Amino acid sequence: MPVRRSILAALALAAALSAGGGCAHFAKVKFYTHPENPDPDLKTIAVAPFFNATSATVDAERTADLFASELVQCGVVKVERPRAVLEAAYRLKYPEATSAPANVRIQDLISEPADAVRVAKALRADAVIVGTVTESNPYFPPVLGLAIQVFCTKTYTLRAEDIDRLIQSGKPLPLTTSSAGNVLDAFERVYDSNQSMLRTEIKGYALAREGTDRSFRDEESVLRVSENFVRFCSNQMIREFFKRRGQSIRPEQKPKEKPARR
């Protein structure tokens, strides 16, 4: 119930602030709660192995797997993992194959938006996230750049300015006017841990996780463990996607709220 959720959120916020730590505890409250999924048509999301757009050696498939793990933890959608996407994409291209070889690259299987949509349909997913690592410095203080495109199986009629924005994103798959209708969103972010505001977010993320995951003890456990930093950045991207989806979704697509009990 909306009223009860508001009361519980307020109590959680008050408890966090009373414990001290100011901004970090504001961030802790944010990460303690899961993002809401505003789109009733998004029940299953597949995550494809990520591309690597950097000159560095990056385990992009592992990055995608960590991204998928954060999406699973959100608990708002069913998730198809990168390996399942790779296998489905390979079987679509080579129907006689039983499984994908270990050295196959995702960019050889998903090279255009239509490929992504076909894979989503094959997995009975409502959307597939195709991402790329755009910047990577795993050493302290770490920096990670990610770009994602969210392709859906439905085709929407978009405004001209929305089509232009999506086409300009162009990472990792190039878009056209016709293919943009299958894109729910596309954006890129660079997470630089030198920035004080990001440090506050990292501290809140670690505080929220420390009780359930021993690998998260404090801010340093995120900054100095590469996979933990990737998980934090993935969590940021996922939260922003759902927030942006809620802002852009048409009113008739939004789920109706149940009336509060009196």
Image (cartoon, rainbow, N blue to C red):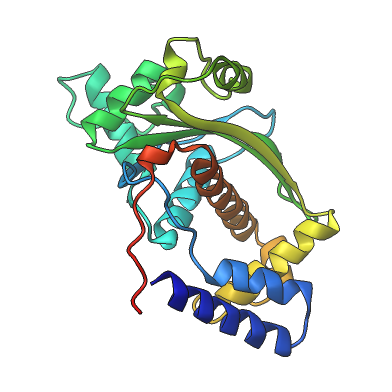
Residue 13 at x, y = what percent? 63, 79
Residue 90 at x, y = what percent? 28, 25
Quadrant housing residue 178: top left
User: In screen coordinates, is 183 left or right of 223?
Assistant: left
Quadrant housing residue 146: top right
Question: Residue at coordinates 60% horizontally, 60% vertically from top-left?
Answer: 228
For residue 197, above or below residue 174: below
Residue 125 at x, y = what percent? 28, 38
State whether residue 19 appears in this view. no
Question: Residue at coordinates 34% horizontally, 41% vertically from top-left?
Answer: 83
Q: If the image is split into quadrants, where does the C terminus sit?
A: bottom left
Question: Residue at coordinates 64% horizontally, 34% vertically from top-left?
Answer: 188
Q: If the image is split into quadrants, where does the N terminus sit?
A: bottom left
Question: Residue at coordinates 47% horizontally, 20% vertically from top-left?
Answer: 158
Quadrant housing residue 57: top right
For residue 185, above or below residue 162: below
For residue 181, above or below residue 2: above
For residue 248, above or below residue 142: above
Pick the front one: 119 or 153: 153
